[in-house]
């Protein structure tokens, strides 16, 4: 049984990635393309409670402070600073492109780091790509 003075974060996980807890600093590196705007951590503590609470979506675009409260009256607190980083783009990947096969209408778009988005033909069947053109994707300014 934990002491009434206990107030530690023992585990901090987002999207299956465990945070590295060093003192009162927690850092995580999530996969390329992950948005920091709405991430939901799973937090385990020794103590009475944590704020913000575990399982509630948070904006991690900057460092986020989590406070753990012990079981004393009034409660003692311990603040943790959580920083979320996003894995950098692999070397050599610099420009997005699209590959299309005009004979079957199947296209694949590849973002700047190689993440693919495949489209299917008009019948809804994903077909193998036969490359007959490579070009930058079209963008709009609306």
Image (cartoon, helix red, strand yellow):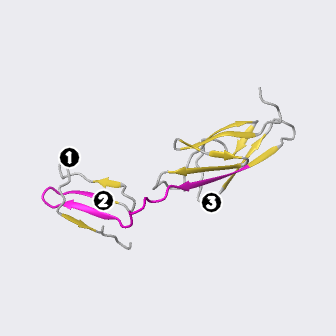
Q: Residue at x 75, y 43 (%)?
A: 68
The residue nearer to you, when weighing 91 against 114, is 91
- Which mark is in front, 2 or 1? 2
Q: Dot 3 corresponds to which residue?
A: 62
Residue 142, percent from left and from top: 38, 72
Residue 92 colored in magenta in the image: yes
Dot 3: what SS?
loop
Q: Dot 2 corresponds to which residue?
A: 109
Q: Quadrant of residue 3?
A: top right
Q: Residue furthest right?
A: 73
State yes or no: discs 1 and 3 in contact (Cβ < 8 Å): no
Relative vertical location of residue 5 with respect to residue 125 in this rendering, above or below? above
Residue 37 colored in magenta in the image: no
Q: Earlier in the sequence, mark 3 or mark 2?
A: 3
In magenta, the rendered stretch is: 80-108
Relative vertical location of residue 21 with respect to residue 71 in this rendering, above or below? below
Dot 2: what SS?
strand
Q: Residue at x 12, y 58 (%)?
A: 103
Q: Earlier in the sequence, mark 2 or mark 1?
A: 2
Q: Residue at x 59, y 53 (%)?
A: 84
Dot 1: what SS?
loop
- Which mark is in front, 1 or 3? 3
| Separation (CA) of disc 3 from disc 2 | 30 Å
Q: Quadrant of residue 12?
A: top right
């Amino acid at each position: 049984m934990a002491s009434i003075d206990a107030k530690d974060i023992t585990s901090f996980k987002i999207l299956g990635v465990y945070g590295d807890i060093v003192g009162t600093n927690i850092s995580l590196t999530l996969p390329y393309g992950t948005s920091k705007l709405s991430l939901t951590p799973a937090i385990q503590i020794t103590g009475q409670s944590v704020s913000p609470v575990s399982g509630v979506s948070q904006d991690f675009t900057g460092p986020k402070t989590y406070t753990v409260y012990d079981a004393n009256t009034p409660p003692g607190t311990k603040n943790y600073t959580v920083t979320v980083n996003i894995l950098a783009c692999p070397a050599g990947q610099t420009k997005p492109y699209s590959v299309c096969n005009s004979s079957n209408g199947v296209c694949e778009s590849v973002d700047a780091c190689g993440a693919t988005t495949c489209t299917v033909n008009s019948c809804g069947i994903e077909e193998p790509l036969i490359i007959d053109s490579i070009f930058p994707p079209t963008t709009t300014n609306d």
